[in-house]
Amino acid sequence: MYNIIFFKGILETMDYFTDKCTEALSLLGADTYIIDAGDPSTYNGEDFRRFMERENKAVFLWNQIGLNMTVDGNNLWEKYGVPIYDSIQDHPRNFPDTLTSPPGDFHALVLDNNHAAFIREFYPAIRDIRFFPNGGACEGQMIPYDKRSIPVLYCGSVQKAVSGFPMLSIFADQGKMYYNQTIGLMISDPSLTTEQAVSRVIDGCGFSPDEYHRLFFATSVQIDMYVRRYFKLSFMHALEKKRIPVAVYGDHWDDGFSEPISIHTRISSRRCNELASDARISLNFMPWYKDGSSERVFNNMLGGSLCISDRSRYLSDHYRDGEDIVFFDLKDPDGFADKVSYYLSDMDKAAEIAANGARKAAENDSWYCRMKTFLSFLEEEK
């Protein structure tokens, strides 16, 4: 039997993921222990000490939360020889300290194969990198498709407006042309990662690899935010123009939307999935993953709604447009709105695709599937 440790109490979304993972691991015959950041007894008490005496242990973390726990001045996981599996939810550029010099027996799990390539290039100390996208979950009663009360749902925030970009002394114009070209390239060709766009723009400028690295780390977050906000707002306004009713739950949608776009405050992950079980169509915008996936696609499918999403290589390899998912082109907001309108009008076809998506996601992309894969990783390491 495997004994898996999780860490909760910092971020609601990752606490929800932990709940889904522990439920799945229980079904798979593994035992779990949860450390609660708000309850010291969960990492100082007798129950914890007894659990740490077991064989076949591993700790599963989200974004390194809980990684640097110490006992007697030593890293807890190193002291007990516990393998660390870290599910890196965000772009790995955000975690240079941890990934440059990770403690103990560290394994990186990434949601996008491009993130794996990034880690191999920038963080050579990471010896084991595995592709491991998030899984999906269903909550609430599965409402028959023709009885669903929400025509179109989007659960997700839009990126904050970028108030300014870092000035770059390496350019005569402080980087103005660099930013304009990089952002313009990503908007004209949204298949590019930010890394690829930056590299293309500065190709031929004579920068050394170290200079490229510094430039990328200094500017890519703001570029990402600008581009992702641009696309989300453009596509939501395309729906607004066609008078398509959309219930939006998230932050920073401050762009003058009118009815029928209905903006609501951010809600919990569990509540999002409950709403997906009452939505006919659920939208997804990839968090700029070009060869992977986050959980929202699979949440939408498992909730029985028709998922309409932009593409990634992973989704294109595992799902079929018009059969179990509907893809849209990030270069065509009007075409996106036309697709949403069409599937609202053809309920039978939408229901068929939604049912196919629910079956395929249950077979391949639930948290149960992910934990089964995770246990296979542990088995390989024996």
Image (tube, rainbow, N blue to C red):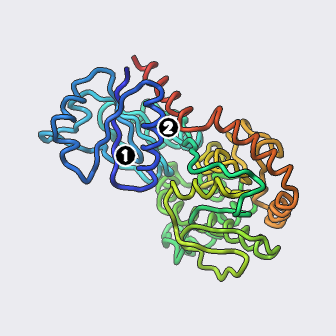
Q: What residue type is labelled 1?
A: Gln
Q: State how many labels appear.
A: 2
Disc number at residue 281?
none
Q: Look at the numbered disc 2 and give the secondary structure of its residue.
A: helix
Circle 1 packing at 10 Å, graded few (<14), some (14-19), many (20+), is: many
The answer to which image quadrant residue 161 occupies is bottom right
Earlier residue among tags 2 and 1: 1
From the viewer's perspective, tell me whether residue 71 is left or right of residue 112: left
Q: Which residue is drawn at 66% across and 38% down?
A: 361
Q: Which percent across, then down, holds residue 187? A: 71, 63
Q: Which percent across, then down, holds residue 239? A: 77, 70
Q: Which residue is drawn at 60% across and 55% down?
A: 287
Asked if residue 39 can be seen in this view, the reply is yes
Q: Which of the image's four quarters has the C terminus?
A: top left
From the viewer's perspective, tell me whether residue 189 is left or right of residue 253: right
Residue at the far top: name it: 382
Q: Which percent across, then down, holds residue 148? A: 72, 58
Which residue is more in the foreground, 64 or 146? 146
Tell us which disc is closer to us: 2 or 1: 1
Q: Name the residue under label 2.
A: 120
Which residue is more in the foreground, 25 or 225? 25
Q: Is residue 238 above or below residue 43?
A: below
Q: Residue at x 37, y 43 (%)?
A: 100
Q: Which of the image's four quarters has the N terminus?
A: top left
Circle 2 packing at 10 Å, graded few (<14), some (14-19), many (20+), is: some
Q: Which residue is drawn at 24% across and 32% down?
A: 78
Disc number at residue 64?
1
Q: Which amino acid does label 2 sit on?
A: Arg
Q: Which percent across, then down, holds residue 119? A: 49, 41
Which residue is more in the foreground, 239 or 223? 239
The answer to which image quadrant residue 106 occupies is top left
Measured Cα–Cα span from mark 2 to mark 1: 18 Å
